[in-house]
Image (spheres, rainbow, N blue to C red):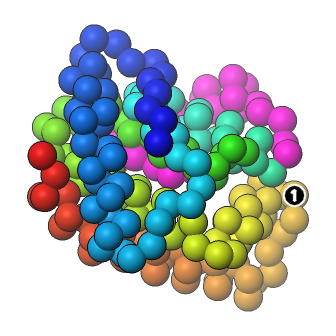
């Protein structure tokens, strides 16, 4: 697991240090609980709200072979979303990209633990056989490269809801982190 930063000022350094301390422990805890491993190379990036959206879009577009259009497309609506995005897991060309929003975690490091566990559950889910291919198909559909039929879209939405439910249920593991 590689940990990087993007767009982090002095105020986010505490979050970065905490992620560096607990990320590996959180990964082992989630893998043990789910009885599966993160098979893809995993990069954890600590960033701000804009960085979460921008890096996720860049990673997803590159993973399906589309050019990145970050500056023009995202600039208009990324200033402040109504509900802060604490983290996100994206498929990248090289593996998986777990994004942690240091800006949204002003409430404390316990929230960072919950975000790490939640997104690591998604990392384990995406490491299951066939999951990466299914996620890449969803990304291609989202960007209009290959459209899903209505049946495929409903099946994909059910799978996402199931994965989210499992990730929320396993957030309880965050209490075990140092």
Q: Is residue 69 magenta?
A: yes
Q: Position of residue 98 (x, y in %)?
A: 48, 45
Does residue 113 appear left or right of residue 136 in this picture?
A: left
Q: Is residue 126 above or below residue 109?
A: below
Point out the residue furthest to the bottom here.
Answer: 151
Q: Main secondary structure of the magenta part?
A: loop
At a point 28% along the width and 11% down the height, the residue shown is 10
Q: Position of residue 83 (x, y in %)?
A: 35, 47
Question: In this picture, is 137 found above or below 144?
Answer: below
Q: Circle 1 is placed at which residue position? A: 145
Q: Quadrant of residue 135?
A: bottom right
Residue sitting nearer the eye, 159 or 78: 159
Is residue 71 left or right of 102 when viewed as pictured? right
Q: Between 79 and 88, which is closer to the camera in this rendering? A: 88
Magenta region? 65-90
Q: Residue at x 27, y 19 (%)?
A: 13
Does residue 65 appear in the picture of this structure?
A: yes
| Secondary structure category for the residue under label 1 | loop
Residue 11: horizontal and vertical position, in percent?
A: 25, 17
State the residue at coordinates (51%, 70%). 125
Residue 34 placement: quadrant: bottom left
């Amino acid at each position: 697991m590689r940990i990087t930063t993007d767009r982090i000022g002095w105020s986010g350094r505490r979050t970065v240090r905490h992620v560096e301390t607990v990320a590996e422990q959180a990964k082992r805890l989630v893998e043990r609980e789910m009885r599966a491993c993160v098979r893809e190379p995993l990069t954890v990036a600590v960033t701000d709200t804009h960085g979460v959206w921008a890096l996720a879009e860049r990673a997803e577009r590159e993973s399906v072979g589309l050019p990145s259009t970050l500056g023009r497309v995202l600039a208009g609506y990324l200033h402040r979303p109504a509900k802060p995005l604490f983290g996100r897991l994206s498929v990248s060309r090289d593996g998986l990209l777990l994004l942690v929003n240091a800006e949204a975690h002003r409430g404390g490091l316990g929230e960072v633990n919950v975000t790490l566990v939640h997104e690591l559950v998604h990392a384990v889910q995406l490491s299951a056989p066939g999951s990466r291919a299914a996620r890449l198909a969803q990304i291609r559909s989202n960007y209009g490269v290959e459209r899903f039929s209505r049946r495929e879209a409903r099946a994909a939405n059910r799978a996402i809801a199931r994965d989210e439910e499992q990730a929320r249920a396993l957030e309880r593991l965050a209490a075990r982190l140092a």
